[in-house]
Image: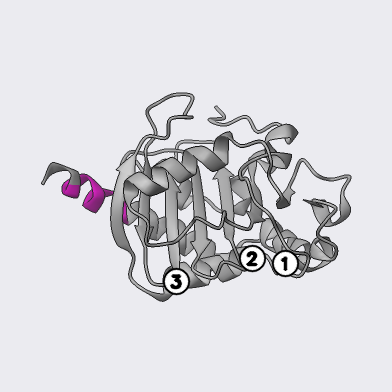
Amino acid sequence: MKLFKLPISFLLFTVTSLTLSKSWGLYTPNEGLKDLLSEELTYVGKYIPSYSASGKFPACIFRNSKVLVKYQYCVGYTIQAAQVTIHSVNPEKGFVKIYAEGDGDIDVSQMTRKDYFNELWYVDSAIDDPNFNINMTLAGYQKYDKLIVTSNSFDGCVTSGNLTNFPNQTYCYPNHPGQVDIWGQTALEFWKDPGQTWYDVLKLMKTKVPKVEEAALN
């Protein structure tokens, strides 16, 4: 059963209130995953997003000196979905968000690309609001997260199985020339075959859940 039905409107108008220059180079999935794995992640805290339809799937926040990471569906039991949002310390890069969901009885951290629903497997990227910084508190990020998700002014790029009629299966807002060919090509390659680094990140994040649950008890 699919946990998350992702309409095209959500893909095109997902997250944030931002102003972008025409010269940026968006954070690619491979860049984000590399920065996430480059240093040990420190646990910041956990919360249930106010916009969560079910109200039962928490998000865990981690960071190192290069990134702040939001790991949605931060649960210890078997679940078929994961969303990893990686915010770069570099404001010119912004963030990259990766969502995967599959079918079956195994956890998403044990799945590979062939197990994912094409229409729900997606990558998007945009520039963070100027007020964002990776050292913000849990309360600060929770407020920021609500702001960007409830905003209806996404201004970035997305690659998804729902976008087969777009170049490179990528949609970029028109005021960002060149990003379909630059970011889009990289994102499409990742979408087709995310590679071992992505699988390693999913496994790593899953191993951190028991430590998060232990911290909550202390």
Residue extending farthest left: 218
Kindly identify which residue carries mark 2. 28
Q: Position of 119 compared to 102: left or right?
A: right
Query: Whole-percent x and y of residue 201?
Result: 45, 61
Task: Tell whether position 38 is magenta.
Answer: no
The type of residue carrying mark 2 is Thr
Kindly identify which residue carries mark 1. 186
* Residue drawn at (53%, 30%) of the image: 3
Task: Tell whether position 209 is magenta.
Answer: yes
The one of 71 and 191 positioned closer to us in this rendering: 71
Q: Is disc 3 surrounded by few (<14), some (14 to 19) or many (20+) residues within 10 Å?
A: many
Q: Secondary structure at mark 1?
A: helix
* Residue drawn at (62%, 29%) of the image: 5
Query: Whole-percent x and y of residue 37?
Result: 43, 70
Residue interval drawn in magenta: 208-215
Q: Position of 178 compared to 49: left or right?
A: right
The type of residue carrying mark 3 is Lys
Residue 63, compared with residue 16, is above or below; it is: below
Total tally of numbered discs in the picture = 3
Going from N to C along the chain, the mark reached first, 1 or 3, is 3
Kindly identify which residue carries mark 3. 66
Is any part of residue 107 visible from this angle?
A: no
In 3D space, how far apart are the residues under numbered discs 1 and 2 (Cα atoms)?
A: 7 Å
